[in-house]
Amino acid sequence: MSDYKTISMDLDSDGILTLTIDVPNQGMNVWDEHLMSEFPDFVERLLSDDDVKGAVICSGRENAFMAGADLRMLEQNSGELNKESFDQGMTLNTLFRRMETGGHTVRQMQREGKKAKPVAVAVEGLALGGGLELVLACHHRVVANNPKIKLGLPEVLVGLLPGGGGTQRTPRLVGLQNAAMMCTQGKNLDPKKALAQGLINEVVEPGKTVEAAKAWVKDNTKGVLQPWDVKGFKVPGGAGSMNPKAVQFFVAANAMALKESKNNYPAIKAIMSCLYEGTMVPMDTAIAIEVKYFCKLLADPVAKNMIRTLFVNKQAAEKGAQRPEGIEKIDIKKVGVLGAGLMGSGIAHVTAKAGMEVISLDRSMEEAEKSVAYTKKILDKSVSRGRMTQEKADAFLARITPTDNYDDLKDVDLIIEAVFERPDVKADVIKKTEAVIGKDVVFASNTSTLPIGGLAKNSSRPDQFIGMHFFSPVEKMPLLEIIPHEGTGDLALAAAFDYNKKIRKTPIVVKDVRGFFTNRVFPPYANEASLMVTEGISMALIENCAAKLGLPIGPLAVTDETTLKLGYDIMTSTKEEMGDDYEPTGSEEFYENMVTKWDRAGRRFGAGFYDYDEDGKRLGLWKGMSDHYPLADDQPSPEEVMERLLYAQLIPTAKCYAEGVVPDPQSADLGAIFGWGFPPYTGGPLSYIDTIGLEAFVTTADNLAQRHGARFTPPQMFRDKAKAGETIYEKKSKAGKKAA
């Protein structure tokens, strides 16, 4: 018997061959090069061994069946579209087809009555992407009755489509509409929903899946066929260019896909093409169509950038790639959160959600209890919608203890300060807190812009002082900026990473400068939109152009959300503290007028760029803006507006990278996408610059600088790289290896 690394095969007395998949050195089972090389042996034994009457496929992992393809392997793809890449894409699909057809041709099955040996699959955990595609290629699909199990095809989220038959078997099982939802949106199904749609065949009690799968195989040893290999098979609900229902579906679905994606995501269009073309032809031809589109996407920079940033680099960051070595894991069980305002309450919520106890401190019990009310409101909504039991909600809420007494902080493992954004206020709470907490407790400040080193001067133990910048609303925003100052020790940095691992944010480490990374890049973007307003450019044009770029919300709307008052306050305090070193943005007067003269301070205050009703619902853009800044007779083209909005983010990101505010391109790209919603299809600002080329970037930036001002001037580092023909991401850079 061969010595397999990823599989084991066991033949029982009934002739049922059990294949157990257990890929080593991976968090979950994935289709890596080893499994790809060993799985054919299972298929060949299934087909050629007369003692084998059927098979059951299961996982050796308790937490999951299979998570899909090893995206690191796909990232190394040459990016060339040729016959070799097509043949490679067909490799796994050919195996799947041989397994489900018994090695017979369609003609043999439909005209000669040939059948396949029965193959059932037993799923006890999640099955995603290529994992679910293996499940669908089996004749009978048994899944454990566990609502936490996820069954889905998430490839679109990294710019790809299911390349193992997912776009073809899914519509043949659940119909075009359900298949399109799964493939274009990457949404998962739980076992009961999957059963109701017809994606799987059986739901049994956990631990009973293998038994049920074997029972089915034992009852079907005379041979079976997949539904689509039976003569006369028709896709549920209809398919094809002549079917009225199918035509109506594709017209509506394509329009909706275009509206949602703004045509920025090639994968969505490719998926719809697969569904349309593939469901009109036999399965073998349909698979070839899918592989063709898969290879085209794999060669596209969109997929390569999304895989690198949204999977490889994101995963590396969340595993703690930048955590200092040699520091033992710090078990944080109890956290003191100073301040129960919007940010403090959000931090308390995510901390308690992660299972940690929270001491929520504010200047009065009335203020401190706001953190409890904040979480209770969220939990009540979850309970009312059936997402959480009342018992679990009560236990969750019980982990947050409000107080106005600093003595209650004496046994915490970590402090996170989120008080008012004033140095004197923060200095006061630092001293009062350090007077009672343990000597080894790390103190983290959630300041948005204030340099951490300046705040650390108020600490008696600056080596244990660090910045942890959350984003609002904390429970929804995925990014965490970790900011060590020059004197921060490894213990504090390790504690920040260990806490972050519990709350499951995407962390980046940034340099201790005013505004850190995100608040050095986002304000110029918001300011550019404000400047355009003062130039008489239509606010609707600005917002629509941002949407076309792929930003989740327009710059005017997001400024309303964060409030113009906050922008004005930060601008004012920065100007005061920097004195002659302050560089005017050009929007100072505009912000002052909006906040102090026209009472348009943002959504929280009832008015901003938009009008709002009493409940804070957006009603429409403020028509009165034209009274102060009349619309220009000649409006710029959408392309011009999009270019300004885009480069207003690219230039400050490039400057931050050049100045070492972010240590590597991975951090910049992650921070941009998860911090303020830079379009994911780009892979992030620096990935986008690499895609268009540094020479093109510098040329466009210089043109913008000539037309609109020096703020668009690219940093010298990028000029030098462009001249030398270099890229930002080197194919096999040390940083890239670390990230992978």
Image (tube, rainbow, N blue to C red):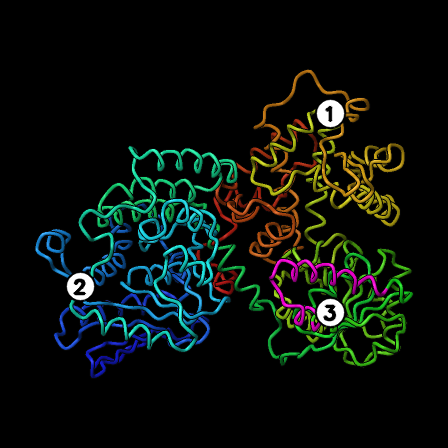
Image coords of residue 274 (percent x, y): 33, 43
Looking at this rendering, what residue extends furthest in the bottom direction? 13
Q: What kind of secondary structure does the magenta stretch mostly adopt?
A: helix
Is 609 on the left-hand or right-hand side of 272? Answer: right
Question: Does the magenta run of residues contain 69?
Answer: no
Residue 397's label in the rendered image is 3
Tell me the amino acid under the disc marked 2: Ala
* Residue 390 falls within the magenta-colored stretch: yes
Pointer 2: what residue? 116
Query: Residue, x 65% and y 33% (percent of image)?
Result: 543
Residue 256 locus on image (x, y percent): 48, 37
Residue in the image at 36% along x and 66% along y? 202
Q: Secondary structure at mark 1?
A: loop
Of the residues tagged 2 and 1, which is closer to the observer? 2
Q: Earlier in the sequence, mark 2 or mark 1?
A: 2
In the rendered image, residue 407, in percent from the top left (x then y), is placed at 88, 78
Q: Residues within 10 Å of mark 2 (few under 14, many from 20)?
A: many
In the image, residue 731 sits, relative to residue 31, either above or below, namely above
Residue 528 left/right relative to 66: right
